[in-house]
Image (spheres, rainbow, N blue to C red):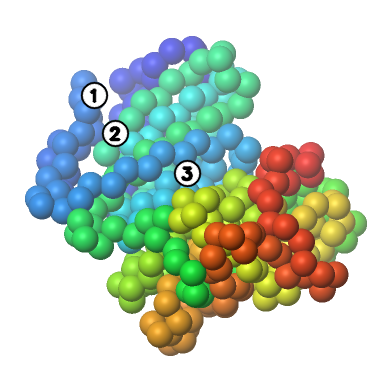
Amino acid sequence: MIEGKLTSELMNKLVLNKTGADRPEVLLPPGLGEDSTALDLACEACLLATDPITAAEEGMGELAVHISCNDIAACGAEPVGILLTVLLSPEDSPEKLERIMEEVHQAAKALNVSILGGHTEVTSAVRRTVLSVTAVGKCQKERIVRSSGARPGQQVLLSKKLALEGTAILAAELAEKLRAVLTEEQLQRARDYIKQISIVPEALAAAELGASAMHDITEGGVLGALWELAWASQVGLEIWTEKIPLLEETRIITEFLGIDPLGLIASGSLIIVGDPKLELEKKLTEKGFQVAQIGVVKERSEGLNLITPCGTKPLQPPRRDHLYDAF
């Protein structure tokens, strides 16, 4: 494609006909000549979060929507809309843009989220496609859940199985290499884990049940997310590594590539912290969510510790996400 802003024809054909769900809060929807959007959120709090997608090609439109909406939901807020920036290289085709926008559109519709606007450009400043999404959400002001809300004595829970996103990316990007240890059925199943990376349903349910703190798990894996939550809350943690649930495909892939699944990008799982008396694990399970207790919150003076089969180790965030060590 030619460098610069998309033509009006391409914008109408490939972008502006894919705007997710229709929401009553949207007063000014996207359109040619419209550089901003407007929302009516009445007396509720407006929450915003932004994230880029740079390490994935397959399914990046779906990833872009879910990752930013996950950040909003982890605060106990309902995602309402997204702003999308798409930067394409001159080597990219209109068909690729159409595929990305269709993925964005379908993911947004599935979450009942509107695409509020954004920017689409072809530029030699990028060597591969970059997507950046800003999500907008709403909730009652007194219902905001913070990463800083964890307190000593509370339970640390994890939703779903760990490293769904990292497993799906590796299965898609390194399929040829992984055929040495995975069957075609396992490879396809691993790639399909990308369809499970939304944590919006369990996050909203946990917030409704009274969770004190939540944090979705993205770059840096569960180790990075736990460290960030502990830092925000100024608490210690005791985490039981054998209680952290892994899928068989994740175990095989990470062992073969020599990387630690605990440090692998893991959108699709949510850290939930709450008082034992709330029985969050039991109540979320009864609602149909897969949840497991993986540790407890301790006093800050007790430090951050991983309880492993080989003994106690300090919990430290990885130097960089282990996804990058696989390539």
Residue, disc 1: 35
Residue, disc 3: 64
C-alpha separation, residue under disc 2 versus residue under disc 1: 8 Å
Q: Nearer the viewer, residue 68 or 35?
A: 68
Callout 2 amino acid: Gly
Q: Is residue 271 visible?
A: yes
C-alpha separation, residue under disc 2 versus residue under disc 3: 14 Å
Tell whether 297 sits left or right of 150. right
Give the residue at x 83% y 48%. 176
Residue, disc 2: 117
Label 3 CA crowd tier, 10 Å (few <14, some 14–19, many 20+): many
Q: Position of residue 157 (x, y in %)?
A: 53, 72
Label disc, if present, on residue 298 of the rendered structure: none
Q: Secondary structure at mark 2?
A: strand
Q: Earlier in the sequence, mark 3 or mark 1?
A: 1
Q: Secondary structure at mark 1?
A: loop
Callout 3 amino acid: Ala
Give the residue at x 9% y 50%. 42
Q: Is residue 179 visible?
A: no
Q: Secondary structure at mark 3?
A: helix
Tell whether 229 sits left or right of 57. left
Residue farthest to the left, as pictured: 42
Quarter of the image for the C terminus: give it. Answer: top right
Q: Position of residue 132 (x, y in %)?
A: 45, 34
Labels 2 and 3 touching (C-beta < 8 A) = no
C-alpha separation, residue under disc 3 versus residue under disc 1: 21 Å
Query: Residue 187 appears in which quarter of the rendering?
Result: bottom right
Q: Earlier in the sequence, mark 2 or mark 3?
A: 3
Callout 1 amino acid: Asp
